[in-house]
Amino acid sequence: MREVAIIGVGMVECGELWEKSLRTIWAEAAVAALEDAGVDAVDHITVGCMSPGLFVGQEHLASLLADELGMAGVAATRVESACASGGLALRAGIAEVASGLSDVVLVSGVEKMTDVDGADATYALGSAADQEWEGFHGITFPGLYAMMARSHMAHHGTTSRQLAAVAAKNHANGLLNPHAQFHIKVSIDDVLASTMVADPLHLLDCSPITDGAAAVVLMPLAKAKDLAGRRTVVKITGSGMATDTIALANREDLARLRGVELAAERAYKMAGKGPGDIHVAEVHDCFTIAEIMATEALGFFAPGDGGPAAEGGRTSLGGKMPVNTSGGLKAKGHPVGATGVAQVVEIATQLRGKAGQRQVNGATVGLTQNMGGSGGSSIVHILEVE
Amino acid sequence: MMLSPARSWREFPQRYRLEAARCTACGKTHYPPRVICSSCRERKFDTVGMPREGTVVTFTTVHVPPKGFTEQSPLEIAIVELKNGVRVMVQIADLADSRELRIGDPVRLEFRRIAEDGEAGLIFYGHKAVRAR
């Protein structure tokens, strides 16, 4: 396999982008990534998008978007793994370049979620759960994570304050990210005072509905080094993916994310790294409990220590293991199909030393963790400075 | 539209009678039935009924319900482990105060109306759990 590098990154500001369509936000991110890379032709386009059919009534997306970029003729593939679609688009792009099938790949993620109302958005997102046997009874996504939160609390003594600390921290980081959907300060007490969505998760424990797109350009490491000049080259050294039961009732231990553990194990092995080698990480905080459980599954903290770590500032900027410097899904926003690629944009930006006020000084190894549904699919990537 | 008549009809054995499939090789019971056993990969099963008694594994109160459930809001939903070890996701019905519910509480499944597909559409039935006395 050839070594793979990221030569360009781009994304649009996340938010409720009423004035822009799916194809427009996608093209803006794609153009930004191609310009940053300094390339004007690609061999393949991968697109991560969870549900353009339900959100905007559009399937056959990859071809539509290739054309939108003026690249009709180029091979293009849409991949879907619910909220992990973006991570999967990266993995598909890596496979293209590593195998030699393609030299230059535009990896992208996009979701346009505000063209439907809240009830329809809830329905579309709910389609990532087991609809026949769990959705049938009225469970929602916040409800599924609330059940995991209650199990985590019962097993480990995790508290609502510790959950709220994740939201407060990520909103503090979001204040420093110009691409973030929310630039607001949120305190632990604000979270605890917000409306209950699914007990024990409050409104401010949940990530928002977001329009957004992100893209990166991949090429073989050797070629990237030639093209980069004095620019920092970021290489992808580890890629791991795993599945878990989608039906939550079939999961043996509801206080663990087994899929994340497996994906991490595979990515760490491929990169020859361990949790202690990671300087900065973007993890899938679709709900505050998800960040706590993910940081445990990734091995940053022992099972049950994720909550105290968040509350104690260990995952804050300046902490021992900074997590979600972008603001995470919570504050940066969660355009579901774009999220996995946006995480990679943030880590690549950190490793290039270009993260401005939210820069983790000296970061040379970073990790992204993206998951679909309630952990039914999980994708972990490890990025390093060449 | 939540469910087609065909889907509603084919799910009657599981929804109405709680039919499950027990693997003839390893004895694991699957609800709903599977084509291949997720434990031992055997493909032969006996159709078996399921016990109605179980305990609460975890639960939540959904304050923002999905379409079709707004009239029942807030929804108490739990994962219940039945006496045969099978876990099912079900609503908890007839609960005066959700704050009374605890992990480990004994419950019993009862046949109930789950949801209606609008005023003229299908009515969906299945099981909900109530606290065992």
Image (tube, helix red, strand yellow):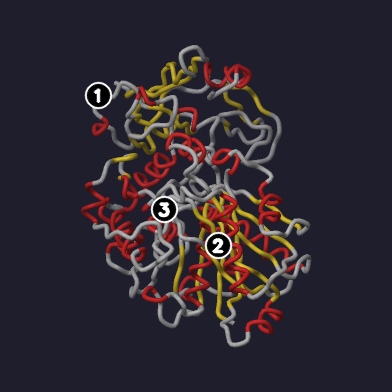
Q: Residue at x 50, y 61 (%)?
A: A12
Question: Which residue is disc 1 drawn over?
Answer: B96
Element assignment for label 2: strand
Residue placed most toward the observer, B114 or A55: A55
Q: Residue at x 30, y 53 (%)?
A: A158
Q: Earlier in the sequence, mark 2 or mark 3?
A: 3
Q: Position of residue A370 (x, y in %)?
A: 52, 57
Element assignment for label 1: loop
Question: Which residue is disc 3 drawn over?
Answer: A290
Residue placed most toward the observer, A244 or B56: A244
Question: Which residue is disc 2 drawn over?
Answer: A380
Q: Is residue A350 above or below residue B69?
A: below
Whether the residues at callouts 2 and 3 have beta carbons within 8 Å, the answer is no
Q: Amino acid at mark 3?
A: Ala
Looking at this rendering, what residue extends furthest in the front direction? Answer: A19
Instruction: Kindly report the distance in space between the C-alpha atoms of the residues bearing marks 2 and 1.
Output: 44 Å
